[in-house]
Image (cartoon, rainbow, N blue to C red):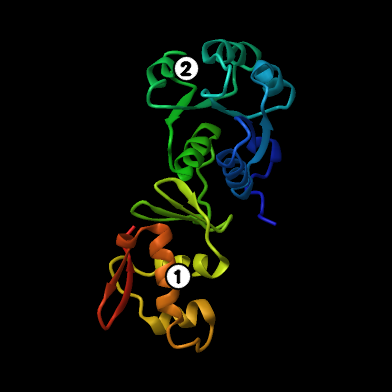
Amino acid sequence: MQPNRYADAERGRVLCVAPPHRTTSVLVGALRSNGFEPQLLRESWSVGAAARAGGARAVVLDVEMSGLRPVEVLADLHRESPRTPVIALTSPEARDRTVSTLRASHDDYLVTPFPMEELLARLRLRLGDDRPTAQLYLRRGEVMVDTALEQVFVENKPVSLSRTEYAVVDALIRHPRGQAMSQDELVTRVWGGPPTSNIVEVYIGYLRRKLGAERIRTIRGRGYVLEG
């Protein structure tokens, strides 16, 4: 179980208004693993009342929900829960319309797709929490590893990996940037002992197909570099 980083649990209570899809599940999981207390709400008409009744300290609002009218929902939020900051998730096409409804000094927005660590940073800023936290996200170019969920993202899209494939990516991304990781180092880190003769090459091949061949570079005689 991940430790809650807030002395007062209510301080981290976040109301999430988003449709039921995989990205929403990743969002909720990331919030929970970072010490927030996410509450998922899928009925836009009740956002304001839910924020007030549930004691939400912040609202993450996906304005692209089917049937959602951002102006009306945000007006309701500002009326029902005037001190609750809102972070709106908007498409590039709807950005200007969304921004025009936000309170400049109190609300914020992110254009999709966005790195999850950016949302977490915005939430901490709005909640006044500037204490350091564990490094839960590792990034190398367009490759990001969520170490809490053990999930890999490429260009902000989740990639389905086996446990061993994930372990290889985790090892490569933790290795110093630009330095090759040798086969022996990968064997020790991932398998903990001598594997079969070509196991590293096999898994590097799997990962190149899933992440993109250009993202893992071979340096002859030295090993592999994750380019991102």
Disc 1: which residue: 171
Disc 2: which residue: 102
Q: Earlier in the sequence, mark 2 or mark 1?
A: 2
Where's residue 202, x and y in %?
43, 75
Which is nearer the eye, 123 or 89? 89
Task: Classify residue 214 as left or right of residue 16.
Answer: left
For the point 42% across and 15% down, the residue is: 97
Task: Classify residue 33 as left or right of residue 106.
Answer: right
Q: In the displayed structure, would residue 226 be above or below residue 71?
A: below
Which is nearer the eye, 224 or 8? 224
Amino acid at the residue labelled 1: Ala
SS class of the residue under badge 1? helix
User: Which quadrant of the structure image shows residue 140?
Assistant: bottom left
Where's residue 54, x and y in %?
73, 27
Which is nearer the eye, 62 or 158? 158
For the point 29% across and 73% down, the residue is: 218
Q: Quadrant of the N terminus?
A: bottom right
User: Which quadrant of the structure image shows residue 17?
Assistant: top right
Q: In the displayed structure, would residue 139 be above or below residue 38?
A: below
Where's residue 197, x and y in %?
44, 88
